[in-house]
């Protein structure tokens, strides 16, 4: 499985961005998708997760009600819709998936910068 993230950029506080992650390879084996982020000087943190079998979504408290994780029907694209962005959302965002054999894969990261 290969992942290619895109969609980052510079946005003002209160604005929106949609991150996208192109998935290639053995897409049908994927059963968990996630978005992580890492701000300068901080550890990488889980932002949003989706189990593709159950449809259950989970979000970090800091983004609940503002971010939405999704995936298209053929598992070729993952998305993170980010609304009402705040300066503290500034980070490099990474897509991440896990397959049915618990093997994990990372995208290369895309920078999101939110100005106040």
Image (tube, rainbow, N blue to C red):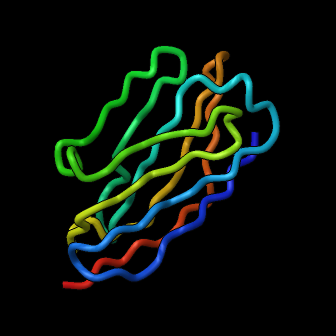
Q: Is residue 34 visible?
A: yes
Q: Quadrant of the C terminus?
A: bottom left
- The residue sitting at 44% across, 30% down in the picture is 50
Q: Residue furthest front?
A: 73
Q: How many numbered discs, if any?
A: 0
When the figure is inspected, residue 93 is found, relative to residue 79, above or below; the finding is below
Position in image of residue 65 (x %, y %): 21, 46
Which residue is more in the foreground, 95 or 38? 95
Q: Quadrant of residue 49?
A: top left
Position in image of residue 48 (x %, y %): 37, 41
Q: Is residue 46 visible?
A: no
Q: Quadrant of the N terminus?
A: top right
User: Is residue 23 found left or right of 79 in the rendered image?
Assistant: right
Which residue is more in the foreground, 116 or 42? 116
When the figure is inspected, residue 27 is found, relative to residue 15, above or below; the finding is above
- The residue sitting at 42% across, 49% down in the picture is 36
User: Is residue 101 found left or right of 24 in the rendered image?
Assistant: left
Position in image of residue 18 (x %, y %): 46, 61
Position in image of residue 75 (x %, y %): 67, 35
- The residue sitting at 41% across, 55% down in the picture is 81
When the figure is inspected, residue 53 is found, relative to residue 6, above or below; the finding is above
- The residue sitting at 21% across, 73% down in the picture is 14
Q: Quadrant of residue 108?
A: bottom right
User: Is residue 33 found left or right of 62 in the rendered image?
Assistant: right
């Amino acid at each position: 499985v290969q992942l290619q993230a895109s969609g980052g950029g510079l946005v003002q506080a209160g604005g929106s961005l949609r991150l996208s992650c192109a998935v290639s390879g053995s897409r049908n084996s994927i059963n968990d998708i996630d978005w992580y982020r890492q701000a300068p000087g901080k550890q990488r943190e889980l932002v949003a997760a989706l189990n593709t079998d159950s449809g259950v979504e989970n979000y970090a408290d800091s983004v609940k009600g503002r971010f939405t994780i999704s995936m298209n029907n053929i598992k070729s694209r993952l998305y993170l819709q980010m609304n009402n962005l705040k300066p503290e959302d500034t980070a490099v965002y990474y897509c991440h998936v896990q397959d049915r054999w618990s093997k994990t894969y990372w995208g290369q990261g895309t920078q999101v910068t939110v100005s106040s």
